[in-house]
Amino acid sequence: AQKITQTQPGMFVQEKEAVTLDCTYDTSDPSYGLFWYKQPSSGEMIFLIYQGSYDQQNATEGRYSLNFQKARKSANLVISASQLGDSAMYFCAMREALYTGANSKLTFGKGITLSVRP
Amino acid sequence: DTEVTQTPKHLVMGMTNKKSLKCEQHMGHRAMYWYKQKAKKPPELMFVYSYEKLSINESVPSRFSPECPNSSLLNLHLHALQPEDSALYLCASSHREQILSLKNTEAFFGQGTRLTVV
C-alpha cells in the first residue's frame, strides 16, 4: 500500500506569492517522522523541514512551514514569498520508527513539480 | 562539513563491466543509504547500513553489491548490469534513530552518480 500520497499535478505560482504542496500519509505506527525535500534539476536532494508525530506545534524553517493535521494524516508544505529558485520537484517522505536500534527507511511520495513564474 | 560526496558524478559502463560507486561523509552519521532514482520518479531505497552493518536490503538484485568499509565510507559495486539499471544513484547519510524520536534523522544526500549502462 502506498504510504505517502502526493496527487497534485504540476503546480504553478507567481513570484512572491505563497503556495501549498499537499501530502497525505498512511501509517499505524504512533511514532513517525515526516520530511520534505526539494530536488532541483541538478539532481541533489535538499532537506527542507521535519515534523515529528508527537510534535505539538507545526514546524517552520524560514520561508517553509508545515501544516500538520494528524487526524487527517496530512502534512502540507507551505512556501511563502516564492522565489524563482524555488522551481524544483518537491518530495514528501516518511520514516516509521523501527525500535530495533537500526535506522528505518525513508519512503518518498512521487513528488510534485513546482514552477515559479516571474 | 555537511556534505555527502559521491564519485564519480557520471559513469558509462558496458553490461560486462565491473565498476564501483563511492560515497563519503564526515558528519559522524552512523546510518548510510543507497537509493536509485529514475527520471521524474521518487528515489527508491536499495540498502540501509546502520553502524556499518547491512540492516535493510530491498530485494535488490545481486548484481548490486553494497559495502561499508568504515563509518565514513559506503560503496556500491556493480557487475553485469542491464540497460534498465541506468539511473541516478543517490547516497545519503543520517544520524541514528533514538527511541520514540525521529528528530534529526533527516537524510543528507550526495549529488548522485548518473549511471548509463550500454
Image (cartoon, rainbow, N blue to C red):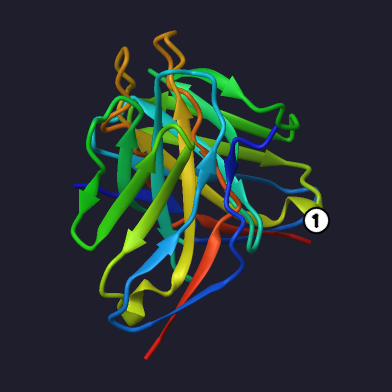
Q: Residue at x 53, y 56 (%)?
A: B113
The quarter of the image holding the N terminus of chain A is top right
Where A76 sits versus B98, above or below? below
- Residue at horizontal 42%, vertical 75%? A87
Residue A113, horizontal then vertical, whole percent: 53, 68
Q: Is residue B110 visible?
A: no
Residue under the image location 59 percent in, 51 percent down:
B42
Q: Secondary structure at mark 1?
A: helix
Which is more toward the observer, A78 or B58?
A78
Crowd band around label 1 with a 10 angstrom C-alpha radius: few (<14), some (14–19), many (20+): some
> Looking at this rendering, what residue extends furthest in the top direction?
A100
Chain under numbered label 1: B
Q: Give B115 or A20, whichever is nearer the viewer.
A: A20
* Residue B5, percent from left and from top: 36, 50
- Tell me if residue B96 can be seen: yes
Please name whichever residue, B23 or A66, is drawn nearer the observer in this view of the structure: A66
Residue furthest front as drawn: A71
Residue A40 sits in quarter: bottom left
Looking at the picture, which amino acid does disc 1 mark? Pro
**Where does label 1 land, which residue?**
B83
Would you say B115 lies left or right of A70 here? right
Q: How many marks?
A: 1
Up/down of A117 relative to B46, above or below: below
Quadrant containing the C terminus of chain A is: bottom left
The image shows residue A109 at horizontal and vertical percentages of 57, 47
Q: Residue at x 48, y 42 (%)?
A: A93
